[in-house]
Image (cartoon, rainbow, N blue to C red):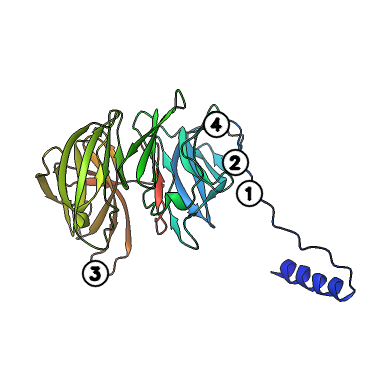
Amino acid sequence: MKLTMAAGLLAVLVAGCGAAGPAARPAAPQPWTPGTIEAPIRYAELDNGRWTLSAFTAKQAKVDATGNASGDERGWRYDLPVTDAGGWVPLTGTAQVRLSPALSADGHRLAYYSTAQRRFVARDLRTGVTRTLSPVVDATARDISDPPRVSPGGELFAVPYGNEILLTDFRTGRTRSLPGFRSLLGLTDTSIIASPEAIDDDEPANAAVITLSLSGQERSRVTVDAAHLGAISPDGRHMASTSGDRLRLTTLATGDQTAEVRLRPLAEPVAATVEHWLSPTKVLVNATTPDTDEFVGHFALDIATGKGERVKNLPQDDDGLAFGALG
């Protein structure tokens, strides 16, 4: 703050002397160009307006990117800011939307909106290979409300763009368009889960959830209450959501609710939100107290029993987290 005030005072004094030139423009953001990052990224967290990658390793790993590293014989932690990954994506006029990045399950590939390039990009963190996932985000891409997605195997990336979904094969860099879809709900190694509607879970309504092949062929179409949308399983067959202290599983091929179990991560009752699938049989939930909505912790829950255990080294996610190598 002192530097800002001093700079402003200096500008006034110079202007008073009649010698002021044109105002200096703020430096344009530059694309993020880190070096080798061998450590698998555990999660991405919004920190001071930009996304930061966090990794934990048993031994010191090769990390050339600018950031913070600390550790000892008990383990190492790395916090790596993605310098052109802002928390907000500008849309039409003054409208903007907050979108999290996406991390592959092994923590080595990242997709995000680049404020420097004004488009979605993907990067292999070990090799530095990058791919462009979308054109420049402008008025034609309005109503983007879903983050990018990466397949469990890390080879496919998808982003919503206006009234279409753009699917990119990281190996070839080729992108294809799947028109007619405004919401991107999930991506697997063999399928895309999307909706033709812009889904807002703050306004409960029925939404069409469609499973597509990678070529765009419709495999199934079901109607789901938008208030009960949840995380898509790695194989694209199920959706996990919560209602109070209950975990619900919906089969996407039929729309049937196939299971409902009570959440039992702690002795006392909790409310929870499903954030991520850890495996075909476990989900990650963000647990809170049911009355005061205070953060309790993150838990890995068995979808068959509702039992689970606390997942360590995950922060409270008021602004959202993106998950990578949690295993």
Residue 291 visible, this orientation: yes
Q: Which residue is mark 1?
A: 29
Q: Which residue is mark 2?
A: 32
Mark 2 belongs to which amino acid? Trp
Looking at the rendered image, the quarter that the N terminus falls into is bottom right
For marks 4 and 3, give the CA distance.
Answer: 43 Å
Mark 1 belongs to which amino acid? Pro
Q: Which residue is mark 3?
A: 291
Picture layout, residue 26 above or below residue 220: below
- Would you call the spot at circle 1 few (<14 residues within 10 Å), some (14-19), or many (20 or more)? few
Quadrant of res 301: top left
Picture layout, residue 230 above or below residue 128: below
For marks 1 and 3, give the CA distance.
Answer: 43 Å
Residue 314 visible, this orientation: no
Picture layout, residue 227 above or below residue 102: below
Q: Which of marks 2 and 4 precedes in the sequence?
A: 2
The kind of secondary structure element at disc 1 is loop
Total marks shown come to: 4
For marks 4 and 2, give the CA distance.
Answer: 20 Å
For marks 1 and 2, give the CA distance.
Answer: 9 Å
The kind of secondary structure element at disc 2 is loop
Quadrant of res 14: bottom right
